Image: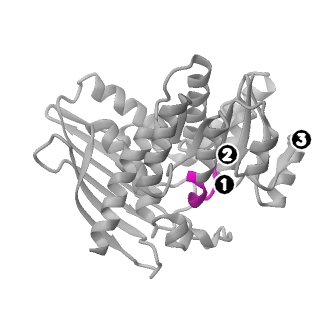
Amino acid sequence: MLKIGMFGLGVNGALHFSNMLHMDDVEVVAVADASKTALKRAKNAGIKHQYKDYNDLLKDRKDLDAIIISLPNFLHHDSIMKSLEAGLNVFVEKPMATKVWQCKEIVNLVEKTGLLLMVGHAMRYYDAIEKMKKITDAGRVGKLEFFTAESIMNGPLSHGVVPSPVPDWWFDPDRVGGGVLLDLGYHLIDLHRYFMGESKLIFQNFDHKYNLKVEDTATLILSSKNGKAANGFINVGWYQKAIFPEYDYRCIVHGDSGHTSTDDYLPKNMYYHAVKEGTKNFIRKISFQKIRPLSYTYFYESFYKELSAFFQSIKNDVETEVTAYDGLKTMEIIEEAYMRMVQ
């Protein structure tokens, strides 16, 4: 049984917490969150050990195997370093850290300690992306030539139909580390690396439709590091007020003998998919079978998959599928884009 500690029970932390309740051989032993409401929810779920400060959790709990970190961006570096120094494996929501120098420190400490660190690059675990990866790895579209990806949503901006408060750190450049490029573009840069190999930045453009201190729209052109021409186009934005389960997202990979796209594999109707998967889970539950939490959402099931992969790496003592190095390489491109725009 893996004993797990958690830092942060916000939106993503709550998803991870809920998922772990449905995992075999995994037990959440302790949680840390500054919110009394979040800690109360954890207590009601049966978690006996609760802390307002993650430093106190690390001091008290010496029986843990890993820490799941879903804290605000500006706390990632400190919480990761302290967790590794305490001898704990780490899963952290992206970004691994908000600065390249911080990412390098983390990479070095992971190598020094021999511990496992996995970054939450959840889009790799979308069912459609997994199918596309199998197809491209099998050579069914030939030599890969061009990659394009888009993700447009409301980001942290509250939807008018479902109003909710947004933490002020989201709009503080020093604490959040960036805008939509860091939030959504991070995933798409990682997917370019995932399909096309090591990447380099060719062009970047930002926009501020809402006059925020961080960008709400970004476009990047990338190339494979060894390629002679640009072969990646990324477009992200926080300006669309779509309502769940609608999601404006697509990824296309072109080869010299064909192409593959998320449009080929995504559910044709997300509402029908949600009803169908919800019904399946209900039947599984009443027949005492293992349910698939969040399968009805389609995209959010990736949170379950990535955590499962992390725990399997710990159990089998093998490298994680998304490493600290992956987190570093993605942040190098993002930081370069930001630096170019201020020059």
| Relative to 315, 206 lies left or right | left
| Relative to 290, 45 lies left or right | right
- Residue 90 picture quarter: top right
Residue placed under numbered mark 2 in the picture: 15
Amino acid type, mark 1: Val
Q: Is residue 300 visible?
A: no
Residue placed under numbered mark 3 in the picture: 48
Q: Is residue 199 visible?
A: yes
Magenta span of residues = 70-77
64 or 233: nearer the viewer: 64
3 or 283: nearer the viewer: 3
Horizontal and vertical percent position of residue 319:
48, 25
Cα distance, mark 1 to mark 2? 7 Å
| Relative to 260, 5 lies left or right | right
Horizontal and vertical percent position of residue 301:
58, 39
**What SS does tag 2 mark?**
helix
Find out whether the residues at labels 3 and 1 contact each other: C-beta distance under 8 Å: no
- Residue at (16, 40) in percent of width and height: 226
Q: Quadrant of the C terminus?
A: bottom left
Q: Which mark is residue 243?
A: none
Mark in front: 2 vs 3: 3
